[in-house]
DNA sequence: CTGAAATAATTAGTACTCATAACAAAATGC
DNA sequence: GCATTTTGTTATGAGTACTAATTATTTCAG
């Protein structure tokens, strides 16, 4: 009758993960899900998904960019980027301008409205970023970023 | 005409990420995708997805477990777990036994075949794990795991 | 300069993951 | 005994990501 108490809280915490708990990949997934969920919640007031924000940030950093270039740095497939830009354009946040020498490509830039929204979204993004860094504890972040980069390159 | 050379390799590497490159979340996503892709490739010979392996590992570690408990530790929704177990059971890797005191629940365990396959898959898993740890550099891993746990808890 | 190959964006269709709601059968608890 | 909870299930939808094929344009070889 020693372990009869287990039935009330049915193996709540003491279920073994079979070694998974000391695995980088498993914790990497949990951490990534948590981070994205937190950021998504912070971006809700602006009706932006995480991907939308990253696209806006890249366009702001390098205006006149073509869709292909964005897809490259953010690792988004070209077809998928089309609908993302479609939506941002429909909301008047992004403009598909023309590239001087190439009539196929679009030169992407933020509209005034897009710029304004991005500035507000950035505040939420920074706030979220600080929350993550707090969880890390300052000194770790540099090594953490370097480590993640090495893993991402695998 | 100074930057005419850019047209040949159109902004290949010098596109700014707008601060994203120093962001934990962004690198976390890249790292997680890379890790899962690598592990998935390693598991291909066994026709197992990453989730399948984790389920098998948990069942092996704690046989007699119920589906709900597995979903809890692995953060898989109950409805989604049903089809996963369905498939593993159909392949003869997992057995849905009966729980003594409860006629609703299933006591999950590995079949001999499932145990055999898991042992082989574990080799691939370990191999993949070493590759990840190599990218990390030994001393980092402990802090890395701790850091990821804190982030995952957010 | 003309035809072949390459490129930018797009369209369409597909697959996979993840989440929610509703349900039946069995167990629990007052 | 009857209301409530729990386990597994079904059905279904949202979201993301991937592939193949198409159009318009540009580049390049001869």
Image (spheres, coloured by chain):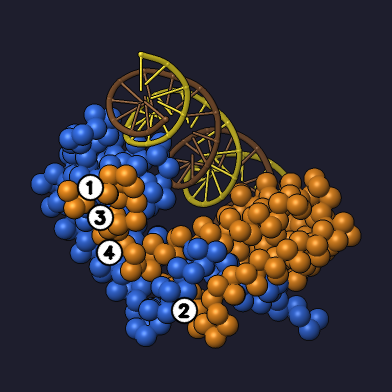
Chain colours: A orange, B blue, C brown, D yellow
- Which residue is labeled 3 in the image? B57
Pointers 4 and 2 in contact (CB under 8 A)? no
If you read the primary sequence from the N terminus, does the residue marked by circle 4 or circle 2 appear first? 4
Q: Residue at 75%, 66% (x, y): give it.
A: A122
Pointers 3 and 4 in contact (CB under 8 A)? yes
As measured in the structure, the alpha-carbon distance from the residue carrying label 1 to the one carrying label 2 is 45 Å
Q: Is residue D9 above or below residue A123?
A: above
- Which residue is labeled 1 in the image? A4
On the question of residue A110 being in view, the answer is: no
**Mark toward the viewer: 4 or 2:** 4
User: Chain under label 1?
Assistant: A
Pointers 1 and 2 in contact (CB under 8 A)? no
Across and down, in percent, residue A98 comes to: 82, 58
Circles 4 and 2 on the same chain: yes
Q: Secondary structure at mark 2?
A: helix
- Which residue is labeled 4 in the image? A19
Instruction: Left or right? Give the position of A44 relative to B46.
Output: right
User: Which of the pair B68/A9 is nearer the observer?
Assistant: A9
Q: Is residue B79 above or below residue A34?
A: above
As measured in the structure, the alpha-carbon distance from the residue carrying label 4 to the one carrying label 1 is 26 Å
User: Chain under label 3?
Assistant: B
Q: Residue at 65%, 72% (x, y): give it.
A: A130
Across and down, in percent, residue A147 comes to: 46, 78
Quadrant the C terminus of chain B occupies: bottom right
Q: Is residue B47 above or below residue B42?
A: above
As measured in the structure, the alpha-carbon distance from the residue carrying label 4 to the one carrying label 2 is 22 Å
Disc sitting over residue A147 in the figure? 2
Quadrant the N terminus of chain B occupies: bottom right
Instruction: Left or right? Give the position of A1 relative to A48.
Output: left
As measured in the structure, the alpha-carbon distance from the residue carrying label 3 to the one carrying label 4 is 8 Å
Circles 4 and 1 on the same chain: yes
């Amino acid at each position: 009758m020693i372990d009869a108490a287990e039935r009330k809280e049915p193996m709540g915490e003491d279920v073994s993960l079979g070694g998974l708990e000391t695995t980088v990949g498993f914790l990497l997934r949990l951490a990534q899900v948590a981070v994205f969920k937190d950021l998504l919640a912070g971006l809700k007031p602006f009706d932006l998904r995480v991907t939308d924000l990253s696209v806006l940030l890249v366009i702001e950093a390098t205006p006149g960019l073509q869709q292909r270039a964005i897809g490259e740095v953010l690792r988004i497939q070209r077809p998928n980027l089309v609908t993302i830009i479609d939506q941002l354009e429909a909301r008047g946040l992004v403009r598909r301008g023309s590239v001087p020498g190439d009539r196929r490509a679009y030169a992407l830039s933020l509209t005034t409205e897009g710029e304004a929204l991005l500035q507000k979204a950035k505040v939420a993004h920074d706030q979220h970023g600080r929350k993550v860094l707090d969880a890390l504890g300052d000194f770790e972040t540099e090594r953490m970023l370097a480590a993640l980069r090495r893993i991402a390159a695998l």
